[in-house]
Image: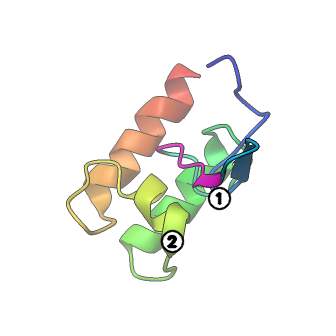
Amino acid sequence: EVLSGLVGTGDVITVDDEDFTMKFVCIIKNDVNGDGVCDVLDCAQVARASNGFEVFDGAYAVAADTNSDDEVDINDYQSVINKALAS
């Protein structure tokens, strides 16, 4: 919650140390457009995906598949709606 809007799904965070460099890809469940918040824009995209009109890949697919069942469907859409209304 503290970083809401500062980082979003798909953002890459790099941690540099003198001995190593690590890169992390951010995944925020329900944030399918990468802006760091769950809102009506995410709802619209997940609705399209649950009806087969849009396909997510990479971090965005993981963020859209809120119940981790390997498909974006009406259950994921309902989860995004619930999150957007709670925000």
Say which quadrant the C terminus sits in. Answer: top right
Looking at the picture, how far across and down is residue 1, in whole percent? 61, 19
In-image side of 81 versus 1 (left or right): left
Nearest the eye: 2 or 86: 2
Q: Quadrant of residue 37?
A: top right
Nearest the eye: 47 or 2: 2
Q: Where are the magenta residues, as a range?
A: 21-29
> Is residue 42 rendered magenta in the image?
no
At 57% from the left and 63% from the top, the residue drawn is 45
Taking the view exactly as shown, the residue that stands out farthest to the top is 2
Residue under label 2, please give it.
58
Looking at the picture, how far across and down is residue 60, in whole percent? 54, 63
Q: Is residue 55 above or below residue 27?
A: below
Taking the view exactly as shown, the residue that stands out farthest to the left is 69
At 52% from the left and 62% from the top, the residue drawn is 59
Q: Amino acid at mark 2?
A: Gly
> Is residue 22 rendered magenta in the image?
yes
Looking at the picture, how far across and down is residue 50, in whole percent? 37, 69
Q: Is residue 86 above or below residue 26?
A: above
Q: Amino acid at mark 1?
A: Gly
Which disc number belongs to residue 10? Answer: 1
Looking at the picture, how far across and down is residue 41, in whole percent? 67, 52
Mark 1 lies on a secondary structure that is: loop
Mark 2 lies on a secondary structure that is: helix
In-image side of 52 versus 55 (left or right): left
Dot 1 or dot 2, earlier in sequence: 1
Q: Is residue 45 above or below residue 4?
A: below
